[in-house]
Image (spheres, rainbow, N blue to C red):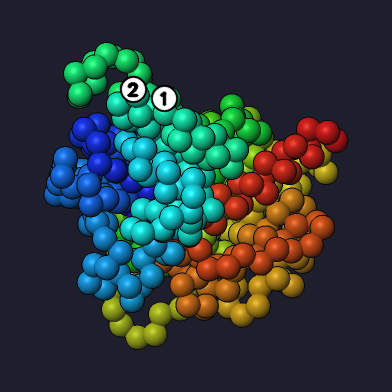
Amino acid sequence: MSAGEPLIGLGVSGGIGAYKAVEVARLLQKRGYRVQAILTRHARKFIGPLTFEAITRRPVITSQWAAGMNADIEHIALATEMRALVVAPATANVIGKFAHGIADDFLSALYLATRAPLLIAPAMNTVMWEHAAVRENLATLTARGVHVVEPGEGYLACGWIGTGRLAEPEEIAEAVHRVVCPAGPLTGCHLLVTAGPTREDIDPVRYLGNRSSGRMGFAIAQEAMRRGATVHLVAGPTPVEPPAVTTLTRVRSAAEMHAAVMAGAVQAAVVIMAAAVADYTPAGGAHGDKIDKGGPLTLTLERTADILADLGRRRHGAPMPVLVGFAAQTGPPVARAAEKRVRKQVDLIVANDVSAEGAGFDVETNQVTLVGASGHEALPLMSKPAVAAAILDRVEALLTAAARA
């Protein structure tokens, strides 16, 4: 799993159904999520951390007192990044602690520290499931907006037949996905997203390029897919593995990207230009042979076509497609981005200072300002998937407004 995929916290408490949580982790990964397993002390009586580490390829959190964790305030860091917390199985004990705000281990402290949605999959003996205390605790949690995957009926570990067995992993994973990505304006919508750099060949060996990794555009494409969109990703040359999308078009040069975007945008409701497209290319194209070393070399460059501006002109002031561009600057970017938005006739510019720590090229985080017609919104330093989610939240609002226009 790459660090660009949204993170789900998977809490496992002490019940015989703990073994099913391994399959829940696998199914969440299959849906494109990273999974951070958190095992309670009692869960480790049923299943070991090594099993989850082998599946998730991440160290399992087993204690808030583990060496090094206090220094990083691990539960706060995880609470901020994860998109949902799911607890499967959720025992009567854990349900009670969550309902009454008891934070005596990592999992219960994590619940209090996060604003991410919580989904629990209870599992216990039938009599425990029907006990008034458990029912009241569940009512308290559901009143707070906690999602519950009801237990199933059948043979229980205690030998009884009744309600209380952990729901099937597929049902739990699907419920998590619905919580994280409910149906919204992007469901069934066609998006075109660009990502990565372009390379402008000088000769068969050398080229002009930039440091873009494509991670930001890939995060947007993946988040759009997760929200139910049909995504056409146009990607420049980058070693980073692109996400699974509906259509992937690989390009190399600015001219190739221009052709792919102008053709693909015809059927798109949204175009998001996250690629770092070269502004200049060698005049007359690349030399056919490698240029020999010698004295000073003079390269004559010519401007490449401005893809975003061409899209804005072609739209002729219509509300669709929604157009989003990026403005990478060194220094405060907002003024330049606002001017760029008006000049190129687009709806939103995502501006960032690439000289700021953690916000430049080829890193896992970004710090951007969303510049629109009604003003700008500065976002804090976040992971690129979190930035992608914020951008698409704004895109959904723009789509809703465009539909009313």
The one nearer the camera, 246 or 300, is 246
Furthest-front residue in this view: 132
**Cβ–Cβ under 8 Å for marks 2 and 1:** yes
Furthest-right residue in this view: 405
Q: Secondary structure at mark 2?
A: helix
| Location of residue 187 (image quadrant) | top right
Residue under the point 38% across and 70% down: 73
The one nearer the camera, 23 or 192, is 23
Lateral position of residue 295 relative to residue 235, left or right = left
Q: Position of residue 65 (x, y in %)?
A: 27, 68
Residue under the point 31% across and 30% down: 124
Q: Position of residue 243 (x, y in %)?
A: 39, 42
The vertical placement of 72 against 168, above or below, is below
The one nearer the camera, 287 or 159, is 159
Q: Secondary structure at mark 1?
A: helix
C-alpha separation, residue under disc 2 versus residue under disc 1: 6 Å
Furthest-bottom residue in this view: 295
The one nearer the camera, 214 or 98, is 98
Residue 130 tag number: 1
The C terminus, quarter of image: top right
The vertical placement of 229 against 51, above or below, is above
Lateral position of residue 65 relative to residue 260, left or right = left
- Report the amino acid beneath label 1: Glu
Residue 126 tag number: 2
- Report the amino acid beneath label 2: Thr
Residue under the point 29% across and 43% down: 13
Q: Position of residue 221 (x, y in %)?
A: 49, 43
